[in-house]
Image (cartoon, helix red, strand yellow):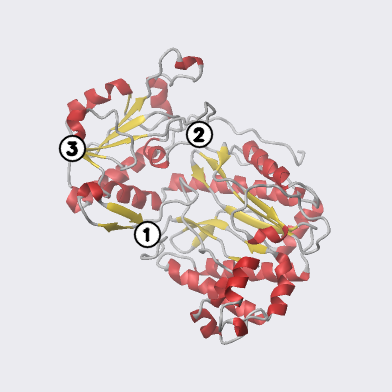
């Protein structure tokens, strides 16, 4: 088989088990003491097409994540009602007139939609009010962001946008089901293949935009229908900038220290992944780039070795920063007592983002518990808490581990020029290593009963990266999706 042979992904009629999600949400709502309402229903409306600014040019469409969680439907304009007591799931198709059918395909027939999606009934949206009158719910739970224009005025007083539904949905989404983990594993492995392809292909003077296009193409070949986020592909000193996505440059051709940073991941059925890899443009790490790279790798591998249920994420943040502090002292960038440096947050001069985040239907997925500002029910304000700040890790959480080290001139100046802080830094050493720019290594992992499983298969050891870049080819192990 040729290294470039693609194994076609076989279409499957197997539906996603999204009704399991509805069961979880309904049970959680009923278990909530203040919401023990067996005559309640959940109403949610999916995303619709939108145009760019004041033009007729369509924006890239993507389904709203909560709607997909409840239905598995990616197409626009649908509605769903879930009976909390019976867990019956009613899907409503958008009404499309004959003129619209000239531009957009109408929804499939109800019998086909019942085969495609894990729902109990399919009706036209014109029948939505009739179902509500039949069910006669005492409460209609919905999100404050949901378009409820089709809910009859008679039921408007029964609608609740109280934060309980969002909190319940987020708790359910945070702990993944086995089928969700299986899908996330496949998406992450397929995205890893795209990262390997870029390692193999990257070379001096190559446009960054070309690498972006290659990533899109390889993802498509492996069945990933879209990108989970705008890919970040930067090189040289600009790797010290976190979210640069303009692709205006080429990879440096005469800098032995130049690195390329690729932060990108694909998406399938709205489930995302998040991977970052860094490698030398020349194909060989310089002394300085290898030193910084292996510091970041040590930070990540130390954290990974500690991950298991019961571990506090905040402790992992502290662990990563302590490793960074020790290593920066070892190579002479930082000067002083380790505990004093940590107390003053000196290492954050070179590491200024979090250690990771949850991953799922959004690449920055729900974070779990929420804090609330209590007031009138209609005015209650909700804020998502910092990722897992108040709870230990649990089995079947999916998250990233992404430490980094960055020589961002602006940020370094802010710290090193602060009165009283100058003596903590060796500026000669900083100048020596600043040629590296920035390095981040990011894997998507799942917490298991006894530890963790790393879903990411793209190589990250120095020797493996250099070997791939030197070979110029690798076997393209296309992922065969079950869904």
For marks 1 and 2, the one nearer the N-term is 2
Estimate the x, y position of residue 230 in percent, counting from the top left: 58, 45
Numbered mark located on residue 17 in the image: none
Q: Is residue 297 visible?
A: no
Mark 1 to mark 2: distance in Å? 32 Å
Camera-side residue: 178 or 165? 165
Left or right: 400 as drawn, with respect to 33: right
Marks 2 and 3: in contact by CB < 8 Å? no
Identify the residue shown where x is 48% and y is 64%: 451
Query: Which residue was labeled with disc 2?
Result: 53
Few, some or many C-alpha atoms within 10 Å of disc 1 (few <14, some 14-19, many ≥20)?
some
Query: Which residue was labeled with disc 3?
Result: 158
Mark 3 to mark 1: distance in Å? 29 Å
Mark 3 to mark 2: distance in Å? 35 Å
Estimate the x, y position of residue 70 in percent, counting from the top left: 36, 38
Residue sitting at the far right: 254
Query: Which residue was labeled with disc 1?
Result: 385
Q: Is residue 69 above or below residue 328?
A: above
Q: Is residue 317 visible?
A: yes
Identify the residue shown where x is 27% and y is 33%: 88
Dot 2 falls on a residue whose secondary structure is loop
Few, some or many C-alpha atoms within 10 Å of disc 2 (few <14, some 14-19, many ≥20)?
few
User: From the viewer's perspective, is the residue at label 1 or at label 2 nearer?
Assistant: 2
Label tally: 3
For marks 3 and 2, the one nearer the N-term is 2
Q: Is residue 198 above or below residue 100?
A: below
């Amino acid at each position: 088989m040729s290294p470039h042979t693609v194994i076609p992904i076989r279409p499957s009629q197997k539906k996603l088990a999204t009704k399991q999600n509805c069961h979880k949400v309904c049970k959680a709502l009923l278990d909530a003491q203040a919401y023990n309402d067996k005559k309640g229903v959940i109403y949610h409306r999916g995303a619709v097409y939108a145009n760019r600014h004041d033009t007729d040019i369509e924006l890239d469409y993507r389904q709203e994540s909560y709607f997909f969680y409840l239905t598995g439907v990616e197409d626009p304009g649908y509605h769903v009602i879930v009976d909390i007591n019976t867990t019956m799931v009613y899907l409503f198709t958008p009404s499309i007139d004959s003129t619209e059918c000239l531009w957009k395909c109408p929804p499939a027939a109800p019998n086909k939609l019942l085969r495609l999606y894990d729902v109990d009934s399919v009706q036209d949206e014109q029948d939505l009010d009739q179902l509500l009158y039949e069910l006669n719910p005492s409460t209609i739970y919905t999100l404050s962001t949901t378009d409820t224009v089709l809910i009859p005025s008679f039921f408007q007083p029964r609608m609740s946008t109280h934060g309980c539904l969002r909190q319940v949905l987020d708790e359910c989404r945070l702990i993944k089901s086995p089928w969700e983990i299986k899908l996330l594993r496949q998406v992450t492995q397929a995205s890893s293949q795209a990262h390997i392809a870029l390692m193999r292909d990257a070379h001096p003077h190559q446009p960054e935009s070309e690498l972006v296009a290659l990533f899109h193409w390889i993802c498509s070949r492996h069945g990933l229908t879209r990108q989970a986020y705008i890919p970040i592909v930067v090189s040289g000193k600009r790797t010290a900038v976190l979210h640069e996505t303009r692709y205006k440059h080429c990879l440096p051709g005469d800098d032995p220290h130049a690195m390329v940073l690729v932060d990108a991941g694909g998406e399938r059925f709205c489930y995302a992944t998040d991977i970052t890899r860094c490698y030398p443009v020349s194909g060989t790490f310089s002394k300085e780039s290898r030193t910084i790279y292996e510091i970041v790798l040590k930070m990540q591998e130390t954290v990974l070795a500690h991950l298991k249920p019961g571990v506090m994420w905040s402790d992992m943040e502290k662990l990563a920063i302590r490793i960074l502090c020790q290593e920066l002292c070892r190579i002479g960038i930082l000067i002083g007592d380790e505990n004093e440096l940590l107390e003053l947050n000196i290492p954050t001069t070179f590491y200024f983002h979090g250690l990771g985040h949850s991953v799922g239907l959004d690449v920055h997925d729900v974070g779990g518990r929420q804090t609330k500002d209590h007031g009138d029910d209609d005015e209650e304000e909700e804020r998502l808490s910092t990722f897992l700040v108040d709870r230990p890790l649990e089995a079947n959480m999916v998250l990233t581990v992404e430490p980094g080290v960055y020589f961002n001139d602006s940020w370094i100046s802010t710290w090193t020029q602060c009165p009283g802080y100058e003596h903590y830094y060796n500026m000669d050493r900083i100048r020596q290593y600043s040629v590296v720019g920035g390095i981040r290594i990011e894997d998507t992992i799942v917490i298991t009963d006894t530890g963790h499983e790393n879903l990411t298969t793209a190589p990250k050891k120095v020797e493996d990266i250099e070997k791939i870049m030197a070979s110029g080819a690798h076997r393209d192990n296309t992922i065969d999706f079950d869904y």
